[in-house]
Image (cartoon, grey):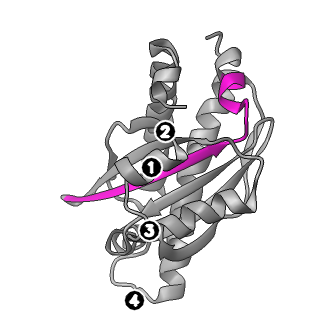
Amino acid sequence: MNSQSYTAIQTDALKELANIGGGNAATAIAHLVSRIIHMNVPRIDILDYAEVFSGIMAEDEDVVAVNLQMLGDGQGSFLFVTPPEHARVLAKLMLPKGMPLVDELEDSALCELVNIIVSSYLHAVSRLTDLLLISSVPALTRDMFGAVLSSTYLESGQYDDQIMIIRNEFLYEGTRVDSALYFIPRPGVLEGLFNKLGL
């Protein structure tokens, strides 16, 4: 199922939720690190599993990925993906200037960043729908994109075939940092969300 399976109003609602969540995330990160962070209006795509590799990213591209589970009144899996060189920039953003960036510290900083982003999105949805949505502890991996995405499916066979992709673009001190947040919902989760929003 692709984004054309949803009405324009439903797609706009998803974009607005992502916009609110992204703005909340940028504000929370800026307060945490005491620096000005900009996050552009995210782009939303809803694609079938196979379409991701043909239209978004090649299977053999190296990535850094952080996975979190959505728990509570709706279940699904969030997968934050970024190239290794951008992962280092995002990690540095979270740390005091001048602090040496060893691997363990980089991973921890990136996990905290993704935790803030996902929590901000879930908080935005919860406020508008009265759903209780929480996220699990983040887990980071470094691998090829195809392996990372397919393992998410293999670990949880109840997930739907469709993927909602929120493409984020951070602007920090003149540097553009690209990333994407993949949401793989359990069957019926997006439909339940639309019902709560009266769509």
The tally of labels here is 4
Q: Amino acid at mark 1?
A: Val
Report which quarter residue 154 is drawn in.
bottom right
- Name the residue: 32% across, 56% down: 178
Front tag of 1 and 3: 1
Give the magenta range: 175-193
Q: Is residue 130 visible?
A: yes
Secondary structure category for the residue under label 3:
helix
Name which of mark 4 and mark 3 comes first in the sequence.
3
Front one among 31 and 159: 159
Badge 2 element: strand
| Quarter of the image where one finds residue 124 | top right
Q: Quadrant of the N terminus?
A: top right
Marks 4 and 2, how far apart at CA: 39 Å
Residue placed farthest to the left in the image?
A: 174
Labelled disc at residue 47: 2
Q: Which residue is mark 4?
A: 100
- Type of amino acid under label 4: Pro
Give the image location of residue 114, x and y in percent. 54, 59
Q: Earlier in the sequence, mark 3 or mark 2?
A: 2
Circle nearer the viewer, 4 or 2: 2
